[in-house]
Image: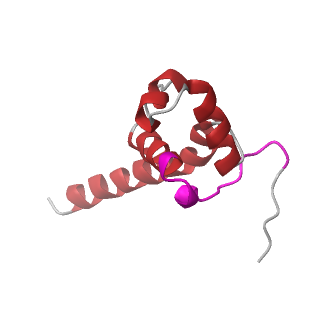
């Protein structure tokens, strides 16, 4: 299996190896449509902002902001698509 990446794009890595990073990713996914600052994320992980930035980048290959922008974009798109499908189904059943 190839793991080729596009230069300048974050890798869609799995945070499972780092439970604190997983907690931050879950927090970001839950708030994918809200502005989130690094200072908001640090207490979620129980780390300083600087250390969280380094640890997240080491685990995910990008900053939390880049991960939210690039990797959660598909997540947000999927949620929006499901919402529209549900609305269509509800409209068709009336």
Dividing the picture into quadrants, the one containing residue 88 is: bottom left
Residue drawn 55% across the image and 54% down it: 18
Is residue 64 in view from this perspective?
yes
Give whichever of 55, 29 is nearer the camera: 55
Q: Is residue 65 visible?
A: no
- Count up the numbered dots: 0
Locate residue 44 relative to residue 59 in the image: left or right.
left
Is most of the magenta stretch helix, strand or loop? loop
Which residues are the magenta region?
Answer: 7-20
Q: What residue appears at the point 76 percent right and 78 percent down from the top-left corner?
A: 1
Above or below, comparing residue 69 to residue 92 in the picture: above
Indicate yes or no whether the magenta region holds residue 19: yes
Q: Position of residue 45 (x, y in %)?
A: 46, 38
Give percent across and percent down for residue 67. Answer: 62, 42
User: Residue at coordinates 48% horizontally, 53% vertically from top-left?
Assistant: 19
Position above or below: 37 against 87: above
As rendered, which of 58 and 33 lies closer to the eye? 58
**Residue 16's x, y, as percent?**
53, 60
């Amino acid at each position: 299996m190839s793991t080729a990446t596009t230069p300048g794009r974050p890798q869609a890595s799995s945070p499972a190896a780092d439970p604190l990073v997983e907690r931050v990713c879950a927090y970001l996914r839950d708030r994918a449509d809200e502005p989130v600052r690094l200072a908001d994320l640090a207490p979620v992980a129980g780390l300083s902002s600087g250390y969280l930035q380094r640890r997240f980048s080491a685990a995910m290959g990008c900053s939390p902001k880049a991960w939210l922008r690039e990797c959660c974009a598909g997540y947000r798109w999927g949620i929006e698509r499901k919402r529209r499908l549900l609305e269509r189904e509800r409209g068709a059943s009336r």
